[in-house]
Amino acid sequence: MPRALISVSDKRGIVPFAQGLAALGWEIISTGGTAAALRKAGLDVLSVDDVTGFPEILDGRVKTLHPKIHGGLLARRDLAAHTAALASHAIVPIDLVAVNLYPFQATVSRSDVSHEDAIENIDVGGPSMLRSAAKNHEAVIAVVDPTDYGPVLDLIRSGPVPIETRRELAAKVFAHTADYDAAIARFLTPKSDGLPNRIGVAMELMQPLRYGENPGQRAALYVSEEPRGMRDLSQRQGKELSFNNLLDLDAAMAAVACWDKRPACAVIKHTTPCGIAVGVSAADAFEKARRTDPVSAFGSVIAFNTVVDAATARAMSGLFVEVVVAPSFHEEALAVFSAKKNLRVVELPVSRAVGSLDYKRVRGGFLVQDAFVFDGAERGWTIPTRRTPTDPELNDLRFAWAAVASVKSNAVLLARDEMAIGIGAGQMSRVDASFLAVHKAREQGHPTEGAVLASDGFFPFADGVEQAAAAGITAIIQPGGSVRDAEVIAAADAAGIGMVLTGRRQFRH
């Protein structure tokens, strides 16, 4: 009778997998919560302490670290001395290990995690079993990824699991434990100004891609264990996602993450918004975001921070879209989208990246920074102008300050009624960004008189404010901090513009 050892923290799919093994005549060994879940499903399970003859001790810290477990995993079946040693010590070989680890990465991503809680979520027995099984992969099938349960079970049903598959599974184990160890090292390593002195980056191949930004560039999607990240992406329909699709949908979900209590929609081209708005519903937010720049919305990626319903799907039916991405979709919405077979429909959780690091590749290394998280708190905001923005203007300024955070620098965004009406993105000078935002608004028939303006960085000269004043802008929000702030404020006063200084910059290169 072949023997499987199953002990998982992430219990997705483990019951059907164990049921499939049991139906094929496998004996199952398990521990703790996994054993309880399998027994609840009606499976006969042998406890680890029944195998070892030794109880779990130290609050479960020691349970699988025993010769009767690791001997059963590491023994080579082709060596007579090994099989004799097993027989002399009454050790039964273990033929499959399905193990995943305590959720260390998810634990330390919490802002309130204690050092003690983090340490208790360092798995010792799990990596040891996985590494033993993976080392002896010619005899032991090592399964660390729940998505492999189905394919492995199918292979077992059809005959011996090929050595090529065993090696692939073993490689996945070592990549997984390397990533796990790197996360622990990052947590424990002394930090310089809050950043680790040494960084290990381990990624797992999730999806090969047809090509990169351009044909001729090889590409693939690699993912880490970061919670609520690309690992959790689920494509519900449509063509294969491209490299550029993935860049755009990531930027799109970051754009709508600024709002957690209002439905928001972002229309993204080349990783920057060409439309963004909040509304009373997802459909309302979409209609407003599309009106920012209907021409540029063609062939875009559209993101929502809330569930997409049938009304929203119908509202989108007249627009050619590459990808629509949201945390979830109603089944009725999916039915509407199914009329467009090539439309990519993607579910991806909203994530605000708190505590994460952001990596930007440079030759021979990485630039590393804290991941940007939009901060809407108004502490430190000041109004240096003679005129105070009105309440409706302040409401639009709050929206515009959140929206401009997702626009490529230099960035200027015009807004009215909680929707962008003109966006100047990626300009080499701030006055050009102001000019472009006004030009784009007027090009689409949006009156600029009475609108508000947000700038992601300070105005180095008064010319950007003068540009806004000439367009009829009545209120501005910007970080401040220029050596010419007095000139900038004087230009606003001369035009009767109310200005808010946030004291915080929001560059996005």
Image (cartoon, helix red, strand yellow):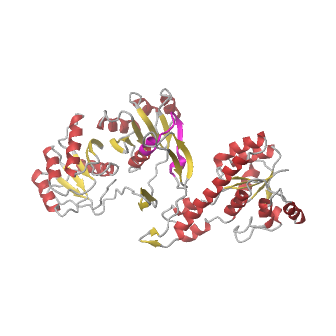
Left or right, residue 125 beside residue 181? right
Residue 424: image quadrant is: top left
Q: Which residues are magenta?
A: 228-248
Q: Count all numbered tags in the image, as a single digit.
A: 0
Residue 375: image quadrant is: bottom left
Q: Residue at x 49, y 47 (%)?
A: 349
Does residue 30 belong to the magenta stretch?
A: no
| x then y, percent, for residue 423 | 27, 43
Q: Residue furthest front?
A: 216
| x then y, percent, for residue 238 | 51, 33
Residue 241 visible somewhere in the drawing? yes
Left or right, residue 95 beside residue 501? right
Left or right, residue 38 beside residue 398? right
Residue 311: image quadrant is: top left
- Image height check: is 272 above or below 8? above
Left or right, residue 434 beside residue 352? left
Q: Residue furthest left?
A: 494
| x then y, percent, for residue 368 | 42, 61
Most foreground residue, 271 or 46: 271
Does residue 245 belong to the magenta stretch?
A: yes
Most foreground residue, 372 or 396: 372
- Image height check: is 248 above or below 129? above
| x then y, percent, for residue 193 | 41, 71
Residue 114 visible somewhere in the drawing? no
